[in-house]
Image: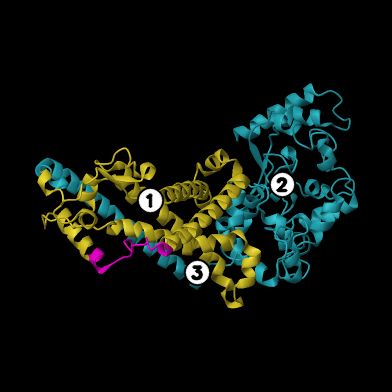
Chain colours: A yellow, B cyan
Amino acid sequence: MNKSIPTEIERFDLSARIQHICLFTTFLLLAFTGWGLKYAYVEPSSAWINIWGGARIAGIIHRIAGIGMLCTFLYHQFYLLNLWRKKDLRLTVVPMPKDVMDLIQNFMYYLGLSREKPKFGKFTYLQKFDYWAVYWGMVIIGTSGLFLAFPVPASYLFPTWSLPWIWDTLFTMHSDESLLAIVFILFIHFYNEHLRSDVFPMNWMWLTGKISVEELKHKHPLEYERLFGKNAGQGKR
Amino acid sequence: MSNQLTIFLLLMFSQALVPAAHAAPDAASCLTCHGAMQGSMEKEKGVIVNLNIDQDRFSKSVHSFLNCVECHMGFTSQPHQAPAARVDAAVQNLANALSAKSKIDAVAQAACAQVQCHGDVYKAYKASVHGQNVIVKKSSDGPVCTSCHGSPHYIQPRTGKDSRVNHFNVVETCGSCHEEKHLTEKYKFSPLVMERYKESFHGRKLKLGHSGAPACSDCHGAHDIRKAADPASPVSGANKLKTCGKCHPGATTKFVAAITHKPLHPVAHYAELGLIILTVGTFLFIIIHVLLDVYADIRDRLFRKGGNHE
C-alpha cells in the first residue's frame, strides 16, 4: 500500500527478448522451408520452394535455421543456469495442480457457468503449455531433425532391430510434430498476442519487454499481488 | 469408313503429287502424306496405327536427320507397295523376337539395335531384366525402347525438358508399369514401391526440382537394369553400399537398410497413428479454446460492460 506503484514493469529482460527473436526467426524459416517439403505433391509447393531459391538452397536454409534454433535452445539452458546461480530463478513456469483448476475455471467462465475468471500467476496455463511445447519440440523435432540431417552417422547409433522402422518413424515425428507446432503457434500464439481485441495488432512486449501494471493486474493478478500486495491500488478506483 | 475413304483419296493425290515415286524415298516424300493424314487405321485385330506424323515435332527430334525407311525398312517404295524390301537378318531376327510386344512395326523397333545406331545400349538392354523378358521370354508386356522413350519420331535428348526419361520425368515413366496393379501382381514387383519412393525424402526433393535427388535409374540403372535380387544389380548386397555411397560417403550395411521401398513397418505405422491422434487432439483443444475465448470476449463486451477488465 505504501509502496509507490509504477505504471509498467519489466516482464522479459533483454536476453529473453533476444532469445525470443532468435527462436521465432528460426521457427519461421524452418516452417516456411519445411512446409514445401512436407506438402511437396500439393501445388504450389514447387513454386513456393523456388521462391526460397530451389530445393537445394531451401534445404540448406532449413538446416542452418535448425542448428540456429538448437543453439538458441541451448543458450536458454545457460540463461536459466545463470539465473539460478544469481538466485534469480523463480519456478513460475513450472506446471502446477493449480493450472488444471485454472483451466476448469476458465472453461466455466467461458460457458457462463461462473462469473469468476481464474486468477493467473505470472504465467497462465496456456503460456506454460507454450513454453514447454518448445521443449517437447526440441526433443521430438530437434533430435529427429539432427538424425535426418546426418543420416550416415545416425545409422551407426541405431540398433539393427530398429532399422526396418526407425527412418519412417523419425520422418513422421519430424513432419507431424512440426505441423502441430505450426498450427499451435498459428492459433494460440497469434490469437493471444496479435488478434485478440485487447492486443491487436500485436503485443509490443516482445520489443519493450514491459507490461503495464494495469494489464498485469488484469491478466496476472497473483503476480500483481506478489509484487505490490493484495490491496495495492485499491484506492485508485 | 470415312477414314478409309480419306486415306484412299490422299493416296490417289500423293501418287500424282510426288515425282520420282520409285526412287528411294526420303523423309520429305513420306511426310507429304503422313504429315497431312489424320486419324488411325487398324492394322490387324486390336493393333491401331496412328497415321499422322507431326512434322514440326519430328523436325525438332534427335531423329530428324533420319529417313523413314532407315527404321521402317520394310517399305521401299511409296505408297508401300508389296513386296516388302529385304531386311537385314540381325534386325529381322530381333524383330521376330519382339513381335509379341511390338505389333505395329517390329522391324522399326528392332532397327534401334543396329550397331551403327544404338548397338551398345542394345547390348546392355538385352542382358537386363527388361530385355530378357521381351527378347527371351517373348513377353507382350515388357518394355521395348519406345515404351520408355516414347515415339522415336519426337524423341528428345535425355536432358530435354520434355524427355520422358529425363531426371525429373523418369519416375513417372517407370511408374507407368511399376504402379500398374496387374503387372505388380504378375511380376511380383515390390507393392507400393512408387508410393513409398514418392513419399520418401528422395522422391519429395525430386518433385521440388532438386537435381541431386536420385530418381529410379540413378540407383537401379537404366538399360542394364536387373532384379534387386540379382547379384549384378547395383542395389544388391555389397553393390548397394557403393551405390548409396555415391551420395552418402561412409554408407555401411546398417545405413543402406534405410531404403527398401517396402510397405510401412507396423511399428512406424502405429507411431504415426499415435502422433496423428496427439496432433488432432491438440488441434481440437486449441481451436475450441480460441473460439470460446472469442465468444466470451464478445459476450463480455456486449453484455457485461467492462466485465473482461474486472
Q: Magenta segment, which residues? A: A84-100
The alpha-carbon separation of the residues under discs 1 and 3 comes to 27 Å
Q: The residue marked by circle 1 belongs to what chain?
A: A
Position of the N terminus of chain B by quadrant: top right
Determine crowd level at label 1: few under 14, some 14-19, many 20+ residues with C-alpha closer than 10 A. some
Q: Can residue B209 be seen?
A: no
Q: Position of residue A141 (x, y in %)?
A: 49, 60
| Residue at point 77%, 63% (across, down) | B132
User: Foreground: A2 or A192?
Assistant: A2
User: In this rendering, would A1 be left or right of A132?
Assistant: left
Quickly name the residue at label 1. Answer: A185
Mark 2: secondary structure: helix
Quickly name the residue at label 2. Answer: B149
User: Foreground: A30 or B101?
Assistant: A30
Amino acid under label 3?
Ala
Q: Same chain for labels 2 and 3? Say yes or no.
A: yes
Determine crowd level at label 3: few under 14, some 14-19, many 20+ residues with C-alpha closer than 10 A. many
Amino acid under label 2?
His
B41 to A68, vertically: above or below: above
Magenta stretch mostly in which secondary structure? Answer: loop
Q: Can residue B140 be seen?
A: yes
